Image (cartoon, rainbow, N blue to C red):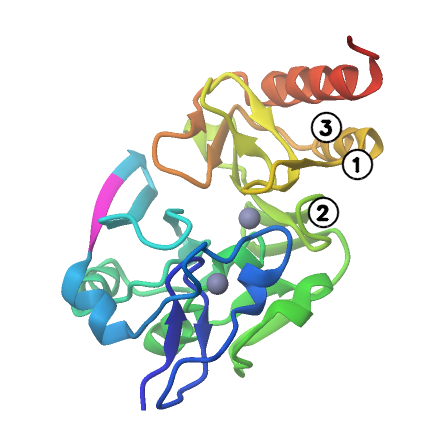
Amino acid sequence: MPIQICDTCGTSYPETSAPPSRCLICEDERQFVPRGGQVWTTPEKLASGHVNGWRQLEAGLLEIHTHPQFGIGQRALLLRTPQGNILWDCISLLDDATEALVRGLGGLHAIAISHPHYYTRMQDWARSFDCPVHLHAADAEWIMRSDPAIRHWRGDALEIAQGVTLLRLGGHFPGGTVLHWADGAEGRGAILSGDILQVAADVSRVSFLWSYPNMMPLSAATVRRIADTLVPWKFDRIYGAFPGRQVMTDGAQTLERSAARYIELLQNNQS
Ligand SMILES: [Zn+2]
Ligand SMILES: [Zn+2]
């Protein structure tokens, strides 16, 4: 029996002969059930109609993105470090070509994921490359396939390789995490942000929402706390969840300016 994959969000569910009746991730107000009802696929069907494309974003950082777009449409990022490769965020398509290419690059040292929308098929990636998956414990209720590779971390920071630190910012999800890469941007530092800081259409801005598809904001206090949490961390670039969405310079100033404007809009009365 195959595992079942939600077509709308890419989350995988345990092996069953028939698809589940519901996707709990999509029924949450931070996602949505499509008007025609939930649609399901399997790893085999997904691989027959999709491929993964690769792009180098800078030395040591590769993007993996599924074509045609699948689920939410996020990219996974493969970060190369002296201690091994780290997969940041995850995607539903793990086909033979992807497995061979990642193996050729040295496999994976660890997987880390920003929040439950990108858990997808982390269990299968972890099994293929025999590595742990680091997830913040605050979002444990959203794991749809338990797996021995999953390691729950607690608190606000966890270094998973030298100069690679997970930072819990919360916001979009209580355990919402970004990854700080000290050697990124030629040593000026980079943040891999998932949906936790959302790089906007104007790539000199980031935004912050509770629900992206349903356009529900976060509070001013939460946005202030998110921005303040990153003040001690040096970074020049911010790599968001989607292809093309990266702030290439002045990342820290971009975050502060964006947060200040967001809070100003929430707090001002406008007619
Ligand atoms: Zn779903
Ligand atoms: Zn999300």
Q: Quadrant of the N terminus?
A: bottom left
Residue 56 numbered tag: none
Who comes first in sequence, dot 2 or dot 3?
A: 2
User: For the residue carrying disc 2, how many other residues have a C-alpha within 10 Å: few (<14), some (14-19), or many (20+)?
Assistant: many
Point 79% across, 36% down: residue: 222
Q: Is residue 112 left or right of residue 49?
A: right
In 3D space, how far apart are the residues under numbered discs 2 and 3 (Cα atoms)?
15 Å
Tell me the magenta residue range: 51-55
Tag 2: amino acid = Gly
Disc 1 designates what residue? 222
Q: Nearer the viewer, mark 1 or mark 3?
A: 1
Tag 1: amino acid = Thr
Q: Is residue 27 above or below residue 263?
A: below
Tag 3: amino acid = Val
> Dots 2 and 1: beta carbons under 8 Å?
yes
Who comes first in sequence, dot 2 or dot 1?
A: 2
Q: Is 138 colored magenta in this rendering?
A: no
State the image coordinates of residue 96 (x, y, percent, origin top left). Answer: 18, 70
Question: What secondary structure is marked by label 2?
Answer: loop
Disc 2 designates what residue? 170
State the image coordinates of residue 80 (x, y, percent, origin top left). Answer: 37, 49
Who is closer to the viewer here, 240 or 173? 173
Point 40% across, 47% down: residue: 74
Disc 3 designates what residue? 231
User: For the residue carrying disc 3, how many other residues have a C-alpha within 10 Å: few (<14), some (14-19), or many (20+)?
Assistant: few
In 3D space, how far apart are the residues under numbered discs 1 and 3 (Cα atoms)?
15 Å
State the image coordinates of residue 175 (x, y, percent, origin top left). Answer: 69, 55
